[in-house]
Amino acid sequence: MIPVNYYLTLSVVLFSMGALGVLIRRNSLVVFMSIELMLNAGNLAFVTFAKMHAANLAAVHNGQIFVFFVMTVAAAEVAVGLALIVLIFRKKQSIDLDQLTHLKG
Amino acid sequence: MTGELFLFFILALTAVLTAVGMLTSRNAVYAALFLVLNFAVVAVFYLMLGSPFIALSQVTVYGGAIMVLFLFVIMLLGAENIKAEVTLKKMWPALVLSVTLLGLIIYMIVAKVPMVGLAAETSVADAAPKPLAVSLFSTYLLPFEITSFLLLVAMVGAIVLTKQEKKGAGK
């Protein structure tokens, strides 16, 4: 028996590492990967809560289907996001976030 | 310590170490490979939590499709190495923020979530994908269809965004 808190703590640790990655990395591809890490940590928490309510089968399915939807949204997000990164690279020959300062005016 | 708990700690350590590896590796290809390993470990956690369908979707969608797309773009742009990464001086506000976040949520977990034990083994009836599919195609039919539409829109969007305009076509 593994306490539910262990899974949740692991999920939170992964989430904060993703947040840290978004804040400290300057390579926009790695920042994007950190966002995926955060989504994944959220999914882990969802599945944990689903398992926590294992007595109620409908609750288990709700949790797992929500994870499924998060995955599809992540896939769509990656497709559009990577297309944008390719566009930015074509325009500026760089994907360094510190150089994307056009909106500063 | 039971074998189950031992397995959990080994896997959790691997997950955290691969995440650290992703954050610290200078080469974007290494970061992507660390992330693949992290997704694989999380897939094992899903198996332990009794959701084999989610675990296998994780491997195919995240470990397969999404990370291949990432690696493809990294190779395409030739953006493996980016100079001028952050120094420790620039890093500490971010470090403080994320550690604060970590501390707050862990405090909430300790204070609010009851210590419920989760058995790693699952009964076959809960884990089978069939009832999940029934639920997906009955209760969640509309969100499911919206999801498929979303994927279509994302695909068309990606194509439109990256399409090269023909030189001089507008003149």
Image: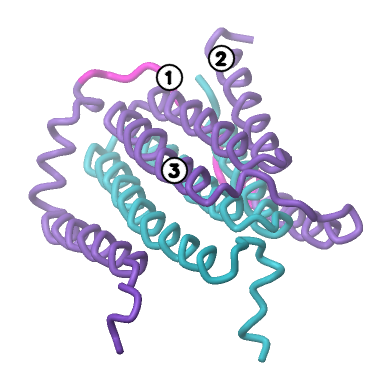
Chain colours: A cyan, B purple
Residue at (27% x, 39% y) in the render: A56
B133 with respect to B109 (left or right): left
The part of the chain drawn in magenta is B108-124
Say which of B97 and B78 sits in front: B78
Residue B112 seen in the current view: no
Which numbered disc, 1 or 2, marks the residue that appears first in the sequence?
Answer: 2
Residue that appears at 83% across and 62% down: B93
Q: Amino acid at mark 1?
A: Ala
Task: Give yes or no for contact between labels 3 and 2 (Cβ–Cβ under 8 Å).
Answer: no
Q: Position of residue A9 (x, y in %)?
A: 61, 39
Label 2 CA crowd tier, 10 Å (few <14, some 14–19, many 20+): few
Q: Residue B95 is drawn in which quadrant? A: bottom right
Give how far across and how far down residue A59 sits, in percent. Answer: 28, 44
Q: CA distance from mark 1 to mark 2?
A: 10 Å
Q: Residue at x 68, y 29 (%)?
A: B17
Q: Position of residue B106 (x, y in %)?
A: 67, 47
- The reply to whether callout 1 and callout 2 are in contact (CB within 8 Å) is yes
What's under tag 2, amino acid-wise? Leu
Mark sitting earlier along the chain (3/1): 3
Disc number placed over residue B72 in the picture, else none: 3
Q: Which residue is mark 1?
A: B120
